[in-house]
Image (spheres, rainbow, N blue to C red):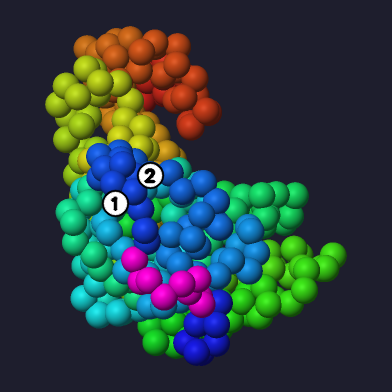
Amino acid sequence: MKTQISRATKTRNRNPFVILSSETLKTMKTSLLNIETVTEYDDMLGVETLHPLVSVIDLSKARPMHHLRHTFSFYVVFLKDEKNCDLIYGRQRYDYQKGSVVCLAPGQVIGIEDTGETFQPKGYALCFHPDLIRGTHLGRTIKEYTFFSYEVNEALHLSEQERHTFIDCLLNIQEELYRAIDRMSKRLITNHIELLLNYCLRFYERQFITRQDAHRDILTRFETFLDRYFTGENAALKGLPSVKYCAAELCLSPNYFGDLIKKETGKTALEYIQDKIIGIAKEQLLLPSESISQIAYQLGFQYPQHFTRVFKKATGMTPNEYRSKTDYK
């Protein structure tokens, strides 16, 4: 399989290093490089461009590279295919096992300033531009593949069998790229990409299941965080906690956090937070000394009317109606 994929990564010249001017190198060291097109990335790696909007790359056949901070204007799916390899995201260096998959959406930043060192990447990369999938089924559903917004430390770790399935999908895409472009090319290429992404969804589901103990620990930490947040003055001072805020406190990306909570509880993260708020509100409504407005402000609501709407939507009763139905006066 590697031999076949390597055909798509024929170098353009014998020089293994990209020839850049001193001014360009200086700019790369101090600024963020935005890679606009698939062809531009192919040129950086010294591989052949078979299609301007999509590329399958055997990274072991690419030129050695310098570290740099860069962002893509297209989707990239990396399969890290070596042991003890480093992948740098932001200013953090992550150590990966063989068979780790990282998915990047347009605009995500990866890398650090150039240290002067070169490295030889290994593995594979699938690059596809949003223009390729525009107007297709994949273009309409791409947001459903939430792993494109996961942080790099939430990478997908493939088993050997899953790795073979992943590479088979890349081979199917590559095979289509070698064919002459006709009216079916776009449909078939996007279908193959969609199949690969659907396999990634399946593999992430497996990873969620096999990491249940770790995920339960995150759920416990989430519950503890909410208890502390609403017990102290955080809610009154900072307002209602958002899903993004909670995820950041747990050092997770919002999408990964949301998918994890949904998998573990059957509820969205927002529903889980709201259930917590309603539970605390019910307890506080049993205390006649607390007014509805006081409870609302203590829970982080900016306006008591908002609290009333949320409470009624969840319980079918207003806070006053709920209080009047209890035996505690």
Q: Are marks 1 and 2 in contact (CB under 8 Å)?
A: yes
Q: Is residue 228 above or below residue 194?
A: above
Describe the element under mark 1 as helix, strand or loop: loop
Q: Is residue 16 magenta?
A: yes
Q: Is residue 265 visible?
A: no
Residue beneath the point at 66% across and 49% down: 131
Amino acid type, label 2: Leu
Q: Is residue 68 visible?
A: yes
Residue in the foreground of this view, choosing between 222 and 176: 176
Are there few (<14), some (14-19), or many (20+) residues within 10 Å of tag 2?
some
Could you tell me how far apart the alpha carbons at marks 1 and 2 are, in whole angstroms? 8 Å
Q: Is residue 236 magenta?
A: no
Residue 100: image quadrant is: bottom left
Residue 280 in picture, x, y percent from top left: 29, 31
Please report whichever mark, 1 or 2, sits nearer to the chain's N-terminal start: 2
User: Is the stretch drawn in magenta largely helix, strand or loop?
Assistant: loop
Q: Is residue 176 above or below residue 183?
A: below
Residue 138 in picture, x, y percent from top left: 67, 57
Amino acid type, label 1: Leu
Q: Is residue 5 above or below residue 294?
A: below
- Say which residue label 1 marks: 68
Residue beneath the point at 23% across and 65% down: 118
